Structure formats: structure tokens, C-alpha cells
Image (spheres, grey):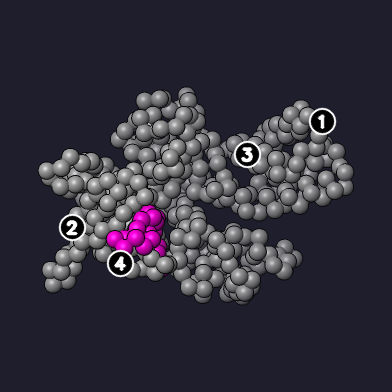
Amino acid sequence: MIEILTDKIIIEIITDSQVSRDAKGQYLFDLICHHLNLLEKDYFGIRYVDPDKQRHWLEFTKSISKQMKSQPPFIMCLRVKFYPPDPAALKEEITRYLVFLQIKRDLYHGRLLCKTSDAAMLAAYILQAEIGDYDPGKHPEGYSSKFQFFPKHSEKLERRIADIHKTELIGQTPETAELKFLQKAQMLETYGVDPHPCKDVSGNPAFLAFTPFGFVVLQGNKRVHFLKWNEVTKLKFEGKTFHIYANQKEDKKIILTYFAPTPEACKHLWKCGVENQAFYKLEKSSQVRTVSSSNLFFKGSRFRYSGRVAKEVMEQSAKIKREPPEIHSVVKSLVTISKLCCEELLSVVRSAQRAGEDKSTILHVLTVSLQRVLIPSSENRQDLSRHLSHWLLEEGGGERPGWGRICHHCLECLLCRLPA
């Protein structure tokens, strides 16, 4: 199963008949990008988590089965791996939208740090992109509280978000709001940060990250080190110890040392650093070299970045000439249903249950609600109705199922039946 840039939606697009056991990561990635009609794909990757909770990027040159320690089915996530230095310069709207989803996710998980005024503006752009202009008939008092923008926030910030949405963004199209969001996010110090938890030499917690502009160390929500990519000379690791070597102004040499939780985490950190440095620093992929994790006289890991570099990707994007892909509206609808339809489903099912309605009535209100948010073809609509009827009447075991199970099942059922 492949999760597409949001925790709320999982789309089963890969079957055993499509991917053989010995298929390499590149084949799977190309299959996903074809499904999304995504051409500017070099910014993205496939992430998975092993049984020890260690995150990995799927290596495209190796077979999938050899990289997986768990048993199938494998659950992987499509994520932005290399953040565009200038997301506004991306050629296609579908690419910008997927990057928008990633950064929105970063904001929610606390990776994109910003002051309150910036946070309010970013959240207001999200509102405008997802629900359009403020409408008092559709958006009652406290409507912005239904959206989860941050790990936690105050009522004061909530009111400020709604105020900006009501007064400053009227008339902006979803595409414009998304673009403004990207431009605002790009200016923040933590844009593109995918944090790796470590400790410094004094044992203090720190987060290491690689961005389009260089290597970053965060401590206590503050950036304490920043090295530009042209300053970084070497990345090394041995066991749980990670070293970064750099030359700054006036031949000032710097060695920073940090300790990862496990050797596996340290190796993952090193590989991410090697790939990011190659992607953002080099002029062309022919300059990429195999690197070693440790000194010449010690046995260590060897690794080579296998993709194109940022300059090549941007040059290739400039050559794209086609009509905007239709998949954009489908992907948008999938995310919209996760944010808005769940609230409606909860409301209608709770009301029906409180009123003592039977299963057929619950089925009807659910189907109507789903059809109102996403209008599938008549064939899909009939299929949805048949599927829900069977589950409610047969698998329900004579008891009215809880709203949580119904909501989850309806969403899963509908999403798996959307036309590609």
C-alpha cells in the first residue's frame, strides 16, 4: 500500500501482478509516478519504516524484497525527498501541489518552525486553498478549529487565522493560495528540514537536517549551526558517531560531531547527507562518486547517489510541454475528503444513531454525504452502495456498527474505487 503525502489517505495502487518479488525500487517508483501523472518526480522518494522503527528511503537500484525486513504487505509513503530550492519555479501544478501537501504535513508535525504571525498566515493559506473564500453561511463561528494545522495552538491563533482568511485572502484561487503558501514557507529557516534526532558531545539533544541550502543543527527550536553545501567537504560515520567536515571563510576548518541513537540511525543519517549534498551541490550527475563512510584504512560502508542533480532536474522540467494532468483534481479530492468529509460523516451518523435509525437509513445518509463531497461515476456510485450494503447487513452481525468503523470503511471503500 502506498500512502500519498497525507496520514489520512491510503490508496492501494500496487498489486502482486504489477510488481514482481525481484522488482527494483525504480520500477515501483515509476509505477507510482505514472499513476499520479507526475513528471517532475526527482524531488520525491519512497519512505518505509522497518520493524525496529528505523526510517529508510527505498533505494531504486536494489530489489524491493531485499530491502524489506518485514513481511508483506509492505506499507510505504510517497514523500518529498529533496525540497525544491524555489518551489514557485516548479513547472507543473501537480508537482507544486504535492510539495504543498508535504510542507503542510511538516507544519502539522512541528518540523516547519516559525513565529506566530507566519504560522497564522500559512494556516490561512491552507484554509483558502482547501475551502475557498469565507462564506458565513457555510463557515460558522470556530470553523477553523476543525482543521489541524499545528501540533498544538491557542484559541487566539485560531481567531487570527480565521480573521486573515475572512479579510485578506478573498478571491484567491486554490492554486494561488498554494503558491503563496510555498513562497512563504520557503523563506523560513526550517524549510525542507527532515530532522534526525541525535546528541552533541555534551549529551544535549539535537536535530540534524539537510536542506536545499545546506546542513542544519537545531537545538531547543533554534538553529545553532548552518553550513552551506559548498562549505561541506566530508561526511563520515562510524558506529553511532557522525562527523561533518567543513571549510568556512578564511580557511577556517570545522568538524562537528554528533551521536545517533543506533548505528542504523547513524547510517541512515549519513546516506541522507550524501544524497542531499550530491543533489544540491553538484552541477551534473556524472560528477557523482562512490563515497566511504569512514577513513581509508578502516572497513566501512560505501554508497553512491544514483539520481539526477538539482540543476539537471530544473533543466529537464523546463522542457515539459503538455496539458495539465487530470490527476491533479483527483488527488485534491482525496485530501479534501480526509479533512471535510470525516466531519460530515461523524455528524450524520451520530444523528442517525441518536434517532434510532436502521442500517439502511444510515447507509443512505452516508452515501449521500460521500456523493456530495466527491461525485464518482454512476458505476462507482453503484459499486459503493453495493459494497456498503453488504458490509452493513452481512458483516455487521446484526448490531449497528459504530460511527468510527463506518467512517473508516466508507472512506477506504470510496478511495479505492476512484477512477485513475
> On the image, numbered disc 3 is attached to which residue?
412
State the separation of the CA atoms marked 3 and 4.
44 Å
State the separation of the CA atoms marked 3 and 2.
48 Å
Who comes first in sequence, dot 1 or dot 4? 4
Label 4 element class: strand
> On the image, numbered disc 4 is attached to which residue?
225
Kind of residue indicated by mark 4: His
Task: Decide: few, some or many residues near mark 3? Use Cα within 10 Å; few <14, some 14-19, many ≥20.
Answer: some
Residue at the spot x=26%, y=58% of the render?
A: 257
Q: Position of residue 26 (x, y in %)?
A: 35, 36
Label 3 element class: helix
Question: Which residues are the magenta region?
Answer: 187-208
State the separation of the CA atoms marked 1 and 4.
61 Å
Query: In the rendered image, is residue 389 in sight?
Result: no
Query: In the rendered image, is residue 193 in sight?
Result: yes
Q: Is residue 69 left or right of residue 202?
A: right
Residue 366 picture quarter:
top right
> On the image, numbered disc 1 is attached to which residue?
398
Which marked residue is nearer to the observer: mark 3 or mark 2?
2
Residue 415 picture quarter:
top right
Who comes first in sequence, dot 4 or dot 2? 4
Camera-nearest residue between 244 and 323: 244
Residue at the spot x=36%, y=68% of the render?
A: 223
Q: Is residue 16 left or right of residue 167?
A: left
Kind of residue indicated by mark 2: Thr
State the separation of the CA atoms marked 3 and 1.
22 Å
Magenta: main secondary structure: loop
> On the image, numbered disc 2 is attached to which residue?
233
Residue at the spot x=58%, y=47% of the render?
A: 8
